Amino acid sequence: MQPKVNRQLFTQRVFDSGSLGVLASVIHRFEDPGKYDLTVFRAGAAVGTLSFVVDENSDARQLSIDLAKIEQQSKDTGDCCGKTATPMVVSPKGYVVFYASRGAGYAVRGGRSSEKKPAFDSENLGKDDLFAVSLLEPGIYSVVDRIGGAKGQVNVSLSAEEAKRLKSLEPVYVEAKGKTFEPAEINLVSTQGLIFRIHHSSRIVVEKQGPLIKERQPAFRWRPSRTVDKGKAG
Amino acid sequence: MAHLTVAANEKTFVSLFNTVRDNFQFEKSDSGSFGPFTAAYHVKLHLEGGSVDLRGDNTIKIEELDIKWDILDLTIGFDLPEICVGGFCIIPTPFGCLLEFPKWCVFDDNPDIEITLPLGGFTSEITAVASLVIKYLTHPERLPGMDDWDAQDTPASPATQTPFVKSVANRWQVFVDPQTLDIDPIDIADTVGDLLESLVEAAIDDLLFFLPGFVKDIIKGILGSIIDLIRVILDIPDDIQEWISDLLNVSFGLLDFIATAIADFLAAKFPIYEIEDPFPMLPKADNPNTPLPELIPVKIPIRDLTAFNNDVEMIIEANVG
């Protein structure tokens, strides 16, 4: 029996930093040491919590947290909003990567246990946060910052030649400056990384609009010209 | 001096040998696991041609005896490597990647690929030096207590019949026993690498047929060159042709099986000649003194049978009584 295909990878059309699905992640650096408690939301409802420790003595430079897994663990323990497994650890110089291995609509918010104000809210990214996506389906994508108002466009292509280079593609960076994206139009090859560096309060939404212009079928076609033999016509 | 002598000249001997040759068939399947891949083969072959030379030193030289590989199918199975997207570096540093994008894999488990290479249709050659050997057979289908006349009248099953004695009677058998037997290594066509590549590509296309075009392109782009993929997965160091040849000859020991099967067939399974024992001198006959019962066959025991050859004929000698 052949293994199942993760079809969501190929049907994802919207990549929203405030509502995470597959192929997207938000990254934040928690610089103040301490224990952090965050709540995971999906479609606005709390579905789990997680804890981690920012420890000055830790060498860990990356802590990757799967929000879908947190939700699942919470379901398995029967505790929607209680504490989950062993706290994770990361260095204050490291980064926490929030992503969803499956599903859609995930957000995360929280901060240090001792503080009421959340240190991080994925629905409202702050300065130095990152929003990274990988767009697979060729086409034209709109890019909108729903908080700052910036607009842009991403063109994703996949030619036969480009397909041979997939493993060597470097990501492309965009500066999200609230009212503008720099650059505002980006050309990518399918699967190539797209990383937004956040400068102002932002919520970035990338959404597929349609195929690339050259892929569109013409509305009409010219028929080859014919020579009519007037002697035989009629 | 022997009571009984039978001689067959070289031409007759060759004719007898050709009968033995034409009755040989070999068919075998086997499989094994070799770490990152599994392999199985199915082989079917027969013998043709060859020259047979009786020599003055009581040996027989067999040359250019063809093995016709009617079927040689090699099936190779392996898992495709993980096919994942993402995993790119978000924050590179001169010392390596500081921050990596997560990975999402296309399949929830690595898909199996299985391809069958049809390698048959070629010919190998055997060279052998043999000598004649004698055996005595009590037919396995002869019932205990059955007398020699009943045995003579009871046909053997088709699978155990020989051209010489078709009943379950006891008999002396003369075999050609190879002392040395050399077989050419299995000759794999040098186009096998191209064939392997095209079969793997077709198998991957079959696996992905239901996916949108751009998805197939992405997956193939991730997998990269098919031939490089095959080399990595199957750990093929250099020459694919040589690798397949080693897989069959060495890992499976296929040539050893075949050589043993041929040697065993010649030396113990299919005799070049047989003499029924006791030998039927006269068939049964109507009794001239009716109404007395018919006359039973006259049979005479054969003993001390020997067989040897010189450069012109095979000679069988025995004593009777």
Image (tube, coloured by chain):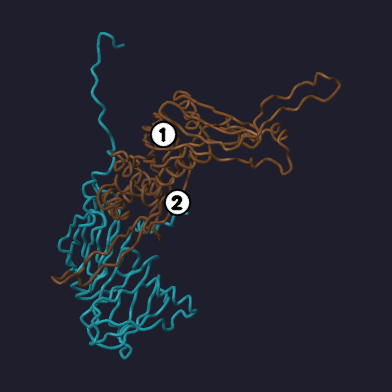
Q: Residues within 10 Å of mark 2 (few under 14, many from 20)?
A: some
Residue type marked 2:
Ser
The chain letter under disc 1 is: B
In what element is the residue under mark 2? strand
Q: Which chain is cyan?
A: A
Residue type marked 1:
Ile
Q: Nearer the viewer, residue A165 or B148?
A: B148
Find the residue positioned furthest to the top. Answer: A231
Q: Nearer the viewer, residue A31 or B314?
A: B314
Q: Which chain is brown?
A: B
In what element is the residue under mark 1? strand
Quarter-of-image position of residue B145 = top right
Confirm or deny contact between disc 1 and disc 2 (CB under 8 A). Answer: no
Q: Residue at x 17, y 69 (%)?
A: B92
Residue B285: where, in percent of width, then height?
75, 22
The chain letter under disc 2 is: B
Closer to the eye: label 1 or 2: 1
Query: Which quadrant would the N terminus of chain B be assigned to in this image?
Result: top right
Quarter-of-image position of residue B72 = top left
Residue B270: where, in percent of width, then height?
53, 36
Tag 1 and tag 2 share a subunit: yes
Q: Nearer the viewer, residue B34 or B252?
A: B252
Specify the label residue B31 is tagged with: 2
User: Is residue A45 positioned above or below B106 on the image?
Assistant: below
Residue A224: where, in percent of width, then height?
24, 25
Residue under pointer 1: B60
User: Is residue B292 positioned above or below A10 on the image?
Assistant: above
Number of numbered labels in the structure image: 2
Query: Which quadrant would the C terminus of chain B be assigned to in this image?
Result: top right
Specify the label residue A35 is tagged with: none
Residue B140: where, in percent of width, then height?
64, 42
